[in-house]
Image: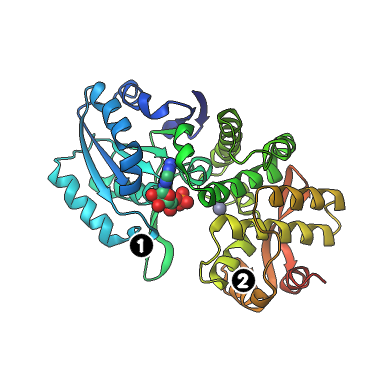
Amino acid sequence: MKKVRVELGSRSYDACIGSGGLGRAGPMLKELGLSGKAVIIIDTTVRGLYGERLERSLSGAGFRVSVLEVPPGEEQKSLATAGRLYRELTGAYAERQTPVLALGGGVIGDLAGFVAATYMRGVPLVQLPTTLLAQVDSCLGGKTAVDHDGLKNVIGVFYQPRLVVADIDTLKTLPVAEMANGIAEVIKYAAIRNRELFAYLEGVLGRAASLEAAALERMVLESVKIKAEIVAIDEQDSGLRGILNYGHTIGHAIEAASGFRFRHGQAVAMGMVAAARVSRRLGMLSDDDVFRLVGLIRKASLPTEVPALKIEEIIQAMKHDKKVKRDRVRFVLLEAIGQAMITDEVSLSLVEEVLRGR
Ligand code: ADP
Ligand code: ZN
């Protein structure tokens, strides 16, 4: 297992990445000084695949394990489900020191993270992400939340985990569409921060139907390093962390305008291409780098062009975004592959021109 330290003073923690992680979770928790009861929050699908592996590791290390199961799906990121989990936690006699382990994708990570942050004013949280998207993005950085009244992530709190274990073996069963969702985010990290990783991805993506374990491990490791570095500098999301929004300003608008028919990764992929073209139009990015970005996204079987029919709606959605002031949008641009910057000076009319291919 490879280790990345997320440096946050007294709340620092390790993210462990590699094969066989779930089997080692029990001993790793003990090393953190945890013992006694442990509660796993998990969705039905992931329980069938990996629940036992984690349970066995915990019992082997002497923990008394309770499992709280949630059906899969974004609808579960709700106060209602959180309420049910609080009740089950008291039912299982969970105490202030009882670790809550989130085993699953981003939905479970956000929901269990929120519950762990608020139950008894916070119990130890361990993230065990099983989707590529969760491993490279949502499990790190301490953002936890549930949806409310049709709004995504509106009720939430920053709460750092005590440990993250990304077992890349779990990615073997991940559906192709879920995989592509995470790959978009890996491409994003490379585009904003690591030109060498970008070149590596050009070599491995799309060559084989399934990625080898070694390639996956490197992708997760390099992405986690970048996110850890950025979160350590800007935990509360007030400055540098903004560059993680590369491709997301337009991406979120695409998701909203399409009624969430596009997956997050697909929307971000189209958003990254559009943002690169905006950078090009402003004379910041070379034609060659735009070409390479488009090529890599295609290799990953992700879309590059926004459907023409939706452009009006996308612009409307961007106007409602809180990052838009008058005609100006806060935007992450590329100066080169591997180097991003934030500006408030991009006009919506330029974004529209670029989306219309003019
Ligand atoms: P994310 O928000 O990280 O994209 P979700 O939590 O929405 O992921 O999970 C997406 C779906 O994939 C859910 O139905 C979940 O049960 C399933 N899933 C999660 N991890 C795995 C895995 N390792 N193998 C197969 N299916 C998984
Ligand atoms: Zn994202």
> Going by the image, does 134 lie left or right of 195?
left
Spatial separation of the CA atoms under disc 1 and disc 2:
24 Å
The residue carrying pointer 1 sits among few (fewer than 14), some (14 to 19) or many (20 or more) residues within 10 Å by Cα, namely some
Asked if 235 appears above or below 20 in the picture, the reply is below
The residue carrying pointer 2 sits among few (fewer than 14), some (14 to 19) or many (20 or more) residues within 10 Å by Cα, namely many
Q: In this figure, which residue is indicated by the disc labeled 2?
A: 318
Q: Is mark 1 within 8 Å of ligand 1?
A: no
Q: Position of residue 75 (x, y in %)?
A: 35, 62
Report the amino acid beneath label 1: Glu
Q: Is mark 2 within 8 Å of ligand 2?
A: no
Residue drawn at 52 percent across, 28 percent down:
4
Please tell me which residue lies in front, 212 or 22: 212
Q: Look at the numbered disc 2 and give the secondary structure of its residue.
A: helix
First reached walking from the N terminus: tag 1 or tag 2: 1
Residue drawn at 35 percent across, 36 percent down:
50
Residue 98 shows in this picture: yes
Q: In this figure, which residue is indicated by the disc labeled 1?
A: 75
Q: Position of residue 162 (x, y in %)?
A: 38, 33
Q: Position of residue 105 (x, y in %)?
A: 42, 47
Please tell me which residue lies in front, 43 or 158: 43
